[in-house]
Amino acid sequence: MTFTQTGDQTIREYVKSWQNLDADEQLALFWFIYKEMGHSITPAAPGASTVSPTIAEGLFNQVKELEDEEQLQLQRDLINNVDTQLTREYGSLGDTTKLLFWYLLSQGMDQGTIVSFPANYQLSAESQQLFESIKGLEFQQQITLFRDYVSPMGAEAKAGAEV
């Protein structure tokens, strides 16, 4: 994997706290972050690479074609590092492309093409506290946190013709 964790201890602690939540709560926190801060993440995620948007969109389009429950399961599988073809495809992406993929998923939730959370969903107290802490980070720290969070997800690509 291309994952290299930041040396920033605060970011590392936030990532660990996030990863310690159950998969659905991790997804919910990411959704709330997107809803609150998506406007500021927009320029950082898509503009980072000239190749990654096409690759991220290709994987996103595969997910978009799945049934709602399958979309949700894929997101859980990514968080839990389950080994499937789609999680291996994700695992072969670079860190910036992974971040862009999650941004596209969030946009899809917003647009109704990806399964979303119920409108009345409430974060747990632990997630809400982490959310408030993340909002207090500087922009570049937030982007580093998001990259460090999404980077280790998925499964390792297999050697040879298998993805």
Image (tube, grey):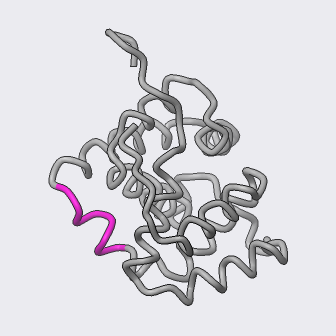
Residue in the picture at 75% in, 60% down = 25
Foreground pick, 119 / 101: 101
Q: How many marks?
A: 0
Q: Which residue lies furthest to the bottom in this view?
A: 136
Residue in the picture at 40% in, 83% down = 139
Q: In this view, does 144 lie above or below 95?
A: below
Residue in the picture at 44% in, 35% down = 91
Which contiguous range is marked in magenta?
42-49
Foreground pick, 147 / 99: 147
43 inside magenta stretch: yes
Q: Main secondary structure of the magenta part?
A: loop
Q: Residue furthest right?
A: 125
85 inside magenta stretch: no
Q: Where is residue 62 shown, x and y percent of the image?
A: 44, 36
Q: In this view, does 51 lie above or below 10?
A: above
Q: In which quarter of the image is the N terminus?
A: top left
Q: Where is residue 73 shown, x and y percent of the image?
A: 68, 39
Residue in the picture at 51% in, 45% down = 152
Q: In which quarter of the image is residue 158?
A: top left
Q: Where is residue 33 shown, x and y percent of the image?
A: 57, 74
Foreground pick, 61 / 138: 138
Question: In the visual, does 137 lie left or right of 79?
Answer: left
Question: In the visual, does 48 lie left or right of 63?
Answer: left
Q: Quadrant of the C terminus?
A: top left
Q: Where is residue 90 shown, x and y percent of the image?
A: 44, 37
Q: Is residue 40 above or below residue 26?
A: below
